[in-house]
Amino acid sequence: MNGLKEALEYAAELKKPEIVNIGGEDYSDKRLYRICHNPKAGKIGMTTLTSLVEYLKAGIDDMDNRMIVHVVSPTRVLLCSPLDLDREREYMVEVNAQVPEFQYGRYMGHESFLIALQSKFIGNEDRDLLLRFAGTVENGTVAQYGDDGVSQKATIKTGIASKGEAIVPNPVKLRPFRTFMEVEQPESAFVFRMRQNERDGVECAIFEADGGAWMNAAMKNVKEYLQYELAELPQFTVIS
């Protein structure tokens, strides 16, 4: 029976569709599929804004005389065409920035935090203050650590044998690597916290405290960079 059913279905598929007009509207007794004669190119993957600019200036591929460079996020840019006759776009390039990973809002070991602060953040006054503060806090002193919601203090080493108190204001202004390396990394506010872990000792964390405003600043920086680099190519419109 299954074989007979499949044979009948196959025979029905071979039959030409019939078009019926009902109430001024055309209907078909079969599902029809449009044959597309306008194939789209596959996206080229890139990781830097420099590579995108070099590709566009080289004029290697044929493109529409109007193209859109879309800054989707601080780490993603797309190159696409305007709408075609089918109301579709062709996406030719996708650029995804490679930025160091840092887990905000998560406590990490004292040494790991200090290394990350030096390698994944651009140096400024508050970063150096945090390095001095966190780098000298002794294991066992965070219990004496004070936090009034605005400033923090803990007992730290001030010499070979002596100890003193250091105060770090909150929030702190830091500039982590969070967008394309070709543009300025936005400075934003973070809340710094420390705690004493009985097993792992002193742990540190920073929490984002700018409500995501840095993303708008980063996208603005990327847009301005691309507008400047592509100023001689007016067929490319940069949006964000």
Image (cartoon, rainbow, N blue to C red):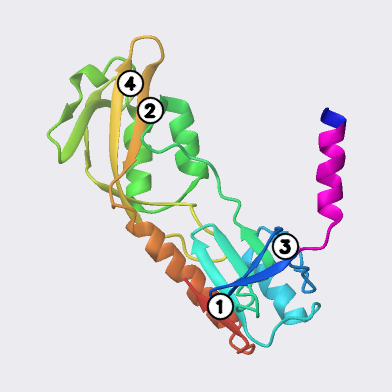
**Mark 2 vs mark 4, CA separation in Å:** 17 Å
Establish if 57 lies above or below 159: below
Pointer 2 or 1: first along the chain: 1
Q: Mark 4 points at which residue?
A: 138
Q: Name the residue under label 3.
A: 32
**Do the residues under discs 2 and 3 have CB atoms within 8 angstroms?**
no
Q: In which quarter of the image is residue 59?
A: bottom right
**Label 2 is placed on what type of residue?**
Tyr
**Label 4 is placed on what type of residue?**
Glu
Pointer 1 or 4: first along the chain: 1
Q: Nearer the viewer, mark 3 or mark 1?
A: 1
**Mark 2 vs mark 1, CA separation in Å:** 68 Å
Pointer 2 or 3: first along the chain: 3
User: Is residue 158 something that shows in the picture?
Assistant: no
Left or right side of 5 for 92: left
Segment colored magenta: 4-17
**Mark 3 vs mark 1, CA separation in Å:** 19 Å
**Do the residues under discs 1 and 4 have CB atoms within 8 angstroms?**
no
Pointer 2 or 4: first along the chain: 2
Q: Where is residue 6 in the image (x, y as percent from the top left)?
A: 83, 37
Q: Position of residue 105 (x, y in %)?
A: 36, 35
Residue occupying the point 14% across, 37% down:
149
Q: What element carries label 3?
A: loop
**Label 1 is placed on what type of residue?**
Gly
Report the predominant secondary structure element of the magenta stretch: helix
Residue extending furthest left?
148
**Label 3 is placed on what type of residue?**
Leu
Q: Name the residue under label 2.
A: 107
**Mark 4 vs mark 3, CA separation in Å:** 74 Å
Q: Name the residue under label 1.
A: 24
Q: What element carries label 2?
A: loop
Q: In which quarter of the image is residue 180?
A: bottom right
